[in-house]
Amino acid sequence: MPIGIYPRKRKPASPRFWIKVNKSDPHGCWLWQGAIDSQGYGRFALNGRNDSAHRFAYRELKGEIPAGKELD
């Protein structure tokens, strides 16, 4: 590896994700402050891929998404 070039170290996913969530809405909504795709869904970089923000949040808080379950 050339001098001065080092692999990029990423922060753990959870803190990178939650810093982009605004929980101060007076109606209790959690507002995504990160990237949004063309359909209006929040996107989050995870392991070199883009993941849906709402799906990541569900897995963080509840665990794996059950087969056949659709998150809205």
Image: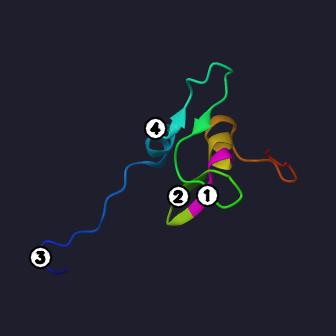
Estimate how packed mark 2 is, as few (under 14), some (14 to 19) or many (20 or more) residues with alpha carbons within 10 Å: some
**Image marks 4 and 2: residues in contact by CB distance under 8 Å:** no
- Quarter of the image with the C terminus in it: top right
Q: Residue furthest left?
A: 3
For mark 3, what is the residue? 3
Spatial CA span between label 3 and label 4:
33 Å
Residue 21: x and y in percent read 54, 36
Instruction: Say which amino acid is labelled 2.
Output: Leu
Residue 65 shown left or right of residue 14 in the figure: right
Q: Are marks 1 and 2 in contact (CB under 8 Å)?
A: yes
The label nearer to you, 3 versus 4, is 4
The residue wearing badge 2 is: 46
The residue segment tinted magenta is 50-54
Q: Is residue 52 on the magenta stretch?
A: yes
Q: Tell me whether the residue at label 1 lies in contact with that at label 4, contact meaning CB atoms closer than 8 angstroms.
A: no
Magenta stretch: dominant SS? strand
The amino acid marked with disc number 3 is Ile
- SS for dot 4: loop
Q: Of marks 1 and 4, which one's residue comes earlier in the chain?
A: 4
Instruction: Kindly identify which residue carries mark 1.
Output: 51
For marks 1 and 2, the one nearer the N-term is 2
Residue behind mark 4: 19
Q: Is residue 12 left or right of residue 66?
A: left
Precedes in sequence: disc 3 or disc 1: 3
Distance of label 4 from label 2 (alpha carbons): 15 Å
Report the residue at 15% width, 80% height from top.
2
Q: Are marks 3 and 4 in contact (CB under 8 Å)?
A: no
User: Magenta segment: does it hold 61?
Assistant: no
| 68 relative to 14, above or below | below
Secondary structure of the residue carrying tag 3 is loop
- Relative to 53, residue 8 above or below: below
